[in-house]
Amino acid sequence: MVKVTFVAHDGRRFPVEIEPGMTAREAALFNEVPGIDGDCGGQCACATCHVHVDPAWIDRVGRLADDSMEADLLQFAEGTTTESRLACQIKLDDRLDGLVLRVPEQQY
């Protein structure tokens, strides 16, 4: 199991566990983490699973590629940073065990 901690904008922490190979979006939805909607079903067609990767983890997760569909969607999300990613695009494996993701106050 891969452990991921989602941190809400108000500081509440939601530690979850999920099988390797699943996405951070699935980890949030399957464990009812508030603030992650994932409206498009994980198809990278919306930005309602926007998260901020904790700076200590961003290099391991990988930064947003400028020329990606993910970057195109995140340009419309509110409050993006250099650590912004879509949870549907973060595939979890053992090297990400302990990952910390921050959930923005709102999703659009």
Image (cartoon, rainbow, N blue to C red):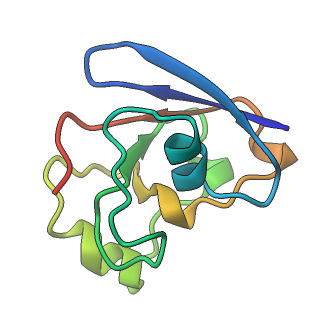
Q: Residue at coordinates 42% horizontally, 76% vertically from top-left?
A: 44
- Residue 43 position, x and y percent, is 46, 78
Q: How many numbered dots are placed on residues in this image?
A: 0
Q: Residue at coordinates 50% horizontally, 46% vertically from top-left?
A: 29
Task: Give the quadrant of residue 12.
Answer: top left
The answer to whether 12 appears left or right of 106 in the picture is right
Q: Is residue 67 visible from the viewing direction of this image? A: yes
Q: Residue at coordinates 27% horizontally, 74% vertically from top-left?
A: 73
107 lies above or below 13:
below
Q: Quadrant of the N terminus?
A: top right
- Residue 69 position, x and y percent, is 38, 84
Q: Residue at coordinates 42% horizontally, 84% vertically from top-left?
A: 68
The answer to whether 6 appears left or right of 11 in the picture is right
Residue placed most toward the observer, 101 or 108: 108
The answer to whether 105 appears left or right of 12 in the picture is left
The answer to whether 63 appears left or right of 9 in the picture is right
Task: Give the quadrant of residue 91.
Answer: bottom right
51 lies above or below 16:
below
- Residue 108 position, x and y percent, is 15, 57
Q: Is residue 66 visible from the viewing direction of this image? A: no
